[in-house]
Structures are given as C-alpha cells and as structure tokens.
Image (cartoon, rainbow, N blue to C red):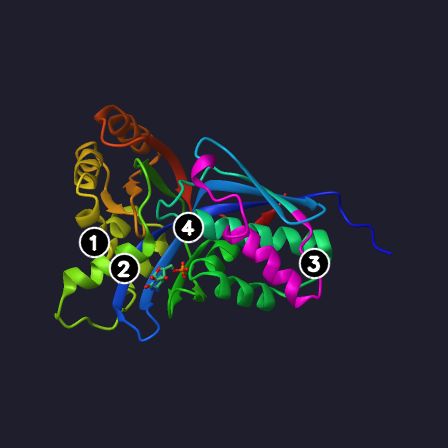
Amino acid sequence: MTRRPASVTVRVPAKVNVQLAVGGPRPDGFHDLANVFLAVGLYDEVTVAPAEELRITVAGPDAGQVPADASNLAARAAVALAARHGLEPRVHIHIVKHIPVAGGMAGGSADAAGALVACDALWGTGASREELLAICAELGSDVPFSLVGGAALGRGRGELLEPLETGGTFHWVFAVADGGLSTPEVYRECDRLRGDTAVPEPEASPALIEALRTGDAVALAASLANDLQPAALSLRPSLAATLAAGTEAGALAALVSGSGPTTAFLAKDAESAQAVAGALAASGTCRAVRVTTGPAQGATLL
Ligand code: C5P
C-alpha cells in the first residue's frame, strides 16, 4: 500500500485582472466576460491533514473575516473531490491568509484551488488536470485560474481559460482597503449604472495581450481596463482618492482589482514600485500596502 503523507501544503497566488470586459447579464445571472487574469506574488498557504471530520481553521491578520465552516470555498472543494471519489472528506484544512479578504484578488478562489490540489495529494485520488479544472469551475468562476496561474484569458463567466504568454516581470503595488466588497453586489451595481445602454460583446484587447507577451509595462499600463471599476467606485467612493494617490506618486496606471475594493498600481520597475508604495502608505487612503510582481505560478505543492 502506498504511504500517504501526514500533511500536504499548497501555495496559491492572488490575481489581478489586467482587463475585465463585462457583457450584459445572462439568463443564469452571470455575465459573459473577457477576463485577462495575471497571477501575482501574494500567496495563501493551504495545509491539509487527516482528521476525524471536516474542520477548517484560518490564520493571519484578517483571519476573523474568513468563514471557518463548511461554507468556506476550500471546504467545499474538499467535499466535491471526496464525493467524486467515494470518500468522506475527513480532513483538517488550515489556511494561512495573506491575500486580502473579499478584496477582488480571488483569495477565496485561491484557497479552494489550494485545498483541491492538497486533498488530491493527501488522499492519493490522482485526479487529472481536466477533472481538477472541472471541479474548480463548479466551485467558482475564478477558481480555475487560481489553479493554473501565470496569465490567461478567461471567457464564459471567466472559467474557460486560454493561457497567455508573458514576456517579463511586471511590478505591482496593491492598496488594501478597509473591509471588503461583495462580488454579486458589484456586478448588480454595474448593471444598474449601465441601465438600458446597449452592452457590446466582451472582447480581449489585442494591444493588452501583446503588451503581456512582450513584457512592456508602459504598453500594458495604457491598456489596463476594468468594466467593474465604476461600480466599485460607486459603492466605495473613497477608492478614488487611493487611485489618485498612487498615480500622483508615479504609478504608470491605477485600477480597481476585479470587483475591488483592493486597488492595483502598475509601476515601471521595482524602485518605482517602492516609491508608489511609500506614498500610498503615507497618504492615509488605504489600510495596508503590498509590493509584488506578476506573473506568479498557480497552485504549487510545497
Ligand atoms: O463564480 P463566483 O461564485 O465567483 O461568482 C460570484 C458572483 O459574482 C456570482 O454569483 C455573480 O453574481 C457574479 N458574477 C457574474 N458574472 C461572472 C462572475 C461572477 O455575474 N462572470
């Protein structure tokens, strides 16, 4: 019999949407997207170990904001994998959280992808990449990308991925806001603000994809776009001051990350990123500042 490990730890990255083109609402309530994801080097760590029953614990400064029960997407990932393989999800999932909670950086999705890969290794279920991706897509629109990382174009509701080439390292600063924003609320606000105006089919920008491919930060900055940004700003007007503070400090461009309220600043190089971070921290317009780079690897066994 194969020996099973006593515990398994998986590292999973956050994401920023360098382009988020949002179509009109679909009959199922979701929106068709052209969603260009870039994984960045802020990570959660998910550790799983055998237990009497499914249990989840969370550590980190914002652990209190994360549900530590069966509703947690990581717990749902373990249940989904176990069900497919006729197992009971008797596992303790421990999450060390560094990705902002409800921040528009796919932290919950990252934990789900991490738990899935970790449980697969712990239980020896040997799920194929396709099976893992299918479970990810059932769990949430952003979960497949958390598994694969790097850069990718997400079609459909974001779950149909096409990997994208990246030609270098991009330097990012993230400003973490106080409190989170609810993704469904931000989509609803986007629909409300659009009213009756016709919404075009969401299309990925060829200039943006080329900028990623060549590693050209200036060109990428010129193409960054987030259709959810007006909605996030409408729900959280104070984000405008954060965006302005980063731009004034020399960021090439600033945008809301996904549904927010984390804001993202693309910098020319590592030195400029430090300067932008310092200015944001001093501006009093955000709760915390993180400096990192992208692309980053997807879910990785440690
Ligand atoms: O797929 P996920 O559970 O992450 O989506 C959360 C919510 O965000 C959905 O219930 C929906 O309200 C909204 N959403 C959407 N269109 C998408 C992705 C998410 O309307 N493509």
Which of the two labelled residues, at mark 2 and mark 3, occupies the earlier sequence position? 3
* Secondary element type, mark 2: helix
Residue 231: mark = 1
Instruction: Please state the extent of the stretch shown in magenta in the rendering.
Output: 63-91
Q: Along the line of sight, which residue is nearer the eye, 94 or 255?
A: 94
- Residue 6: x, y in percent? 75, 43
* Secondary element type, mark 1: helix
At label 2, the amino acid type is: Tyr
Give the distance between the C-alpha atoms of the residues marked 1 and 4, in whole angstroms: 18 Å
- Asked whether residue 93 appears in the rendered view, the answer is yes
Do tag 2 and tag 1 residues touch (Cβ < 8 Å)? yes
For residue 79: magenta? Answer: yes
* Secondary element type, mark 3: loop
At label 1, the amino acid type is: Ala
Left or right, 122 with reference to 80: right
Left or right, 153 with reference to 220: right
Left or right, 164 with reference to 217: right
- Disc 2 under 8 Å from ligand 1? The reply is yes
